[in-house]
Amino acid sequence: MVTTAVSARHAGVRRLALTVVAVWVGAPLLPLLIWSFTRTWRYPDLLPQAWTTTVWSDLAATPETVRALLTSAVIAMVVAAFATAAGLAAGRALAWYRVRGRVLIELLVIAPLLIPPFASAMGVQVVFIRAGLADQPVGVVLAHLIPAVPYTTLLLRAAHAGLDPRLEAQARTLGAGPISAIRHTTLPAIRPAVAAAFGFAFLISWSEYLMTVIIGGGSVTTWPMLLFASAAGTGTTAATSALALAGLIPPVALLVVAGALSRRARPV
Amino acid sequence: MAPGSAAAVTVPAPIAGHTSNVRGTGRARVAVALLTPALVVVLGLFGGGLALAVAQSLGAAPVTGDGTLSLSSYTTVLRDPEFVSSVLTSLWIAAASTLLALALGTAAALTLRSSAAVSRGLALLQAALPVPHLVGAIAFSLALADSGLLSRLANVAGLAGTPADFPALVQDPHALGIILTYAWKETPFVAVVALSALGPRIREYETMARTLAAGPGARLRHVTLPLLAPALLAAGMLVFAFTFGAYEVPALLGRSYPEALPVLAYRGFSAVELDARPAGLAVAVLISVVGALATVGYGVAARILATRTSW
Amino acid sequence: MRGRRTAAAIAGLAVLAAACSAPGTSPTATAQFTTFEQVLDQAKGQTVNLYAYGGDQGANRYIDEVLAVKARGLGITVHRVPVDATTTAMQKLLGDKQAGKTSGGGVDLVWVNGENFRTGKQAALWDCGWTDLLPNGRYVNWADPEIANDFGTPVNKCEAPWSRAQFAFVYDSARVSQPPRTVPALLDWIRAHPGRFTYPAPPDFTGSVFTRQVFYATSGGYTTIPTGYDHDAYQRLSPALWSALRGIAPSLWRSGTTYPTSSAQLNTLYGNGEVDFTMTYGPAEIDALVANGTYPATTKAYTLDDGSIGNTAYLAIPANAANKAAAIAVANLELSPEQQLAKAQPTPWGVYPAIDLTRTDASWQQKFADLPRSAHVPPFAELSRHSLPELQANWTTPLDDGWRQEVLPR
């Protein structure tokens, strides 16, 4: 009897804790959701008098929105691919190899997480303009790599560090080439971390605003640029809300896919 | 804070002996080759960009080459009373956001653990991670504005008759809207870090303390929190540096005076008057100095973390 | 040590890019074209990046749905780049200039005036002389001081008129029966109605005009202020302005502890009924805002009897623009009576024409006369009856900065 009472109380506490967390995470997004389905929502109404889906259909019908979402997606995919590749290499070196000046290199890698990278974007802008990289998606990709590469490197270093490099060496002694050894021993083992690194790098690029403005001027219009301009006064509350929510879809979708991939890779 | 930084805080120590079997000059060459792409980014792009920012803040014109070096932009900035207010504003925003996120995040992690809801809790917390700060700022501006959702709830509850009765939480003198947005966004991050750090080893120590008849409060104070401290310190450092140097949230939710430092920096950099540009860069460089100090601090914290985890 | 060598090579990379050869300078339009036919020939197939403030939905729709459609007939694609302030475009041009990028620039046309135009002219960012090429230039009275000077800066063929604006106050006649007719009366009204008025914080464009409107009054009239910025005059005249603005601050919305950061935010406050007044440089937009329910139906616009500031907005072409021919063709297109009339139509936009209607033939004059009358906004002739010119643009920054230092922190 006592145990059931305790476990019932436990279940209650658990439900309460989970509810609090869910409300914490979800409640602030509620006004966005409501505003994206109405044009006028006057004080002090708790809910709008009239609902509409035209905010969303207008958004989908605006070519510049669709273009910006596509631009953001392409840039973020390229950033994620490069940052994951660079992170894989650097993570492997830092975890498995004797590297001279390791402490310094590790500090260098962590630095862009602590020093806001926009300062370096401000510095490099003039060179990018001259080199024809500014106003171009490629320049924006380069800028986004600054915050993305540290994340992928740290994640993938951790993944390598948790793995015994002798596995790969054994595959080599069994006649596998270096690439094939990596493909068949190391990569499968760290696949969840690779998926996570890719997802995070995508997310960093997808969310980046200030560096895109500095390097891309107005020419490379990404989703955060449209959203910021809209929020700063060029858009109505309804349009801004729908645009904000629209931009949540790709990263959430990617995270779900990455999550599914990493679960599948988990040893059973 | 982007979610990946959780990894930065919870790096497992390398398995002993791994590095020793990979010696030799050939391997050293491989290591350099492997590190090159990442170093091109952090040293070339990031370091090079910072160096160029410093040079231009001193008046150099790296491309046209017709600049003259001087400290005048720094003296202008440091003598501007708005700069001092901006430093204080940014310090207040960063400190308050960090402390709130640490307190709430740790509490959430400990509660989720004790109620055995770790995996579902983690899933919920991670759902907040992909929300960009820009979206968070917009959401909070709609929730906290004086005609926002909270104010309407206050009206329904009979606490506020008009929007003006509701306390200013957006573009307010105490930057509360900014701090609340950051607290909302960084709390899940801290909670995820804390949950990953609350590994089985901490459990062992707690059990040990329980057998020594330590009460729950004492266990928390003398066992759990001290063991969590390095991870929380590192997470706090990341949150502090981020909230000190981020632009979007204070740009949308901040007052027009005094502005947060990154807003001041970008306004100078993007100003139409040409002489404002070096001043904007100077502010950006000064923010970077704070970030560099945080980097060193982080390095120290990470060392402590590494020694603790290799017990 | 190998590592060090690699590091040095990497560090050099960012700077290496700077060593790229200097791009050639764009020829000026007048050097490139002698007739408008040449312009049209070359313009075919070009895309114009038109940088325009994106906060005016009516203007956005006019550009996308009217101007761009018509330009397509000339083989020109108009790509509107929405910016949250024209300074974004200026920053880009200045960045190009600093980087020595003198051709192939990404900005072809800028909707501009005032301080931005002046700075651009000082830094030689504009292509000049091309307005002579415009056939539709015959509809413009270039000698009119309100056209020939952009906030006191001579236009000098560096920009073509786009539209006219008149600064007006907007109020809810259901709440305010007798709106104040002069600046001193307005200041009294504000003190008598605490919390019901505010203005956007300069350097917001509208907030900045409001400050100047009060400055005219506290200085004893527009004529007492030197048109060009003068530091002594600033020292002498601005204290009265600051004390007037500090004086009303406690009676403003939120007791003046904070100000709306944009005119859009002020409009939202007005739409929500949190304040009784808003203000605009484009009163013609009000009909649309009432129609879609943003503003109450009892909204009215008016100008003060002691004067209201008016100005002209222009299109300018950067000296390093990549698509000058198409930019000139679009600037010509928008000066046609047809486009000026389309701009003046309340749907989608509704803005005052920059051309001299007496220079158009009678059928066009009739069409302008037949524009629908607004229930909320007096006709332009009445709005502009007490029109006052803008001060020279070099006043804008000192006044905006002064406001940040003298009024905001209190």
Image: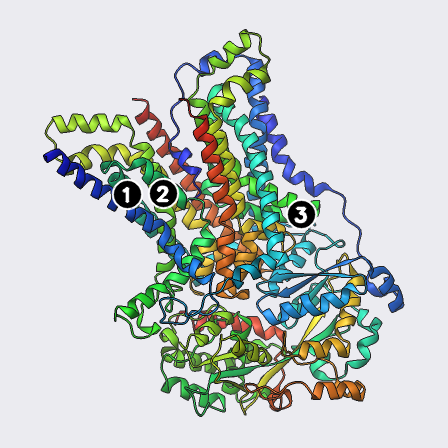
Q: CA distance from mark 3 to mark 1?
A: 43 Å
The residue at 54%/12% (across/down) is B24
- Please provide percent x and percent y for residue C335: 76, 75
In the rendering, which numbered label is found on residue B125? 2
Q: Quadrant of residue A144?
A: top right
Pinpoint residue C76: horizontal percent, then vertical percent.
78, 61
Q: Residue at x 39, y 41 (%)?
A: B126
State whether discs 3 and 1 lie on one chain. Answer: no
Crowding around mark 3 (Cα neighbors within 10 Å: few <14, some 14 to 19, many 20+) is some
Identify residue for label 1. Answer: B108
How far apart, in angstroms, are the residues tagged by discs 1 and 2? Answer: 10 Å
Residue annotated with mark 3: A136
Which residue is outermost to the front? A1
For badge 1, the amino acid type reads Ala
Q: Residue at x 52, y 71 (%)?
A: C400
Q: Are marks 1 and 2 in contact (CB under 8 Å)?
A: yes
Q: Is residue A193 above or below residue C193?
A: above
Q: Nearer the viewer, residue C409 or A164?
A: A164
Residue C366 can be seen in this image: yes
Q: Amino acid at mark 2?
A: Leu
A253 with respect to B123 (left or right) = right
Amino acid carrying label 3: it is: Gln
